[in-house]
Image (cartoon, helix red, strand yellow):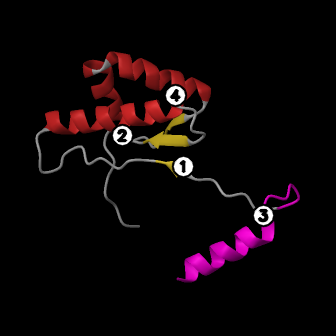
Amino acid sequence: EQAITIGQKVLQRGGNSKSSRDTIHAIGNCHIDSAWLWPYRETIRKVARSWSTTISMFEAGMPFNFAGSQVVQFSWLKQYYPTLFAALKARVGKGNFTPVGGSWVEMDTNI
């Protein structure tokens, strides 16, 4: 509740004014466990479905940014879904899709 209250104050302060000193960025991401309780082939399909949906949303003109954080998933796309991988690379070039992190797989870590 405290986070909601703080967020509401920030939004009320800035509104749509160009003089606002606050900027909020929202970046889409889908956390897909690469080694969950299903076979790898199912994870590979989930990656393809999730990111093809994202590409479809971009192509429909939805203005948003998306981040992907697991190198293994890029590798799977390149190997099993090369057309989708090419579309994703094009979106990286347009600035809609951003590869982030530097790990082969995304870890579940508490800091």
Horizontally, residue 43 falls left or right of residue 32, namely: left
**Position of residue 106 measured from the top left corner of the image (x, y, whole percent):** 34, 48
Q: Classify 10 Å Cα crowding around label 2: few (below 14), some (14-19), many (20 and above).
A: many
Per the image, the residue denoted by label 3 is 15
Horizontally, residue 81 falls left or right of residue 95, namely: left
The first of marks 1 and 4 along the sequence is 1
Residue at screen point 75% across, 72% down: 12
Residue at screen point 71% across, 76% down: 9
**Position of residue 81 measured from the top left corner of the image (x, y, whole percent):** 29, 21
**Position of residue 78 measured from the top left corner of the image (x, y, whole percent):** 33, 21
Element carrying mark 3: loop
Which span of residues is magenta-colored?
1-20
As shown in the figure, which amino acid type bears the numbered disc 1?
Answer: Ile
Depicted 1 relative to depicted 69: above or below = below
Residue at screen point 79% across, 71% down: 13
Q: Quadrant of residue 63?
A: top right
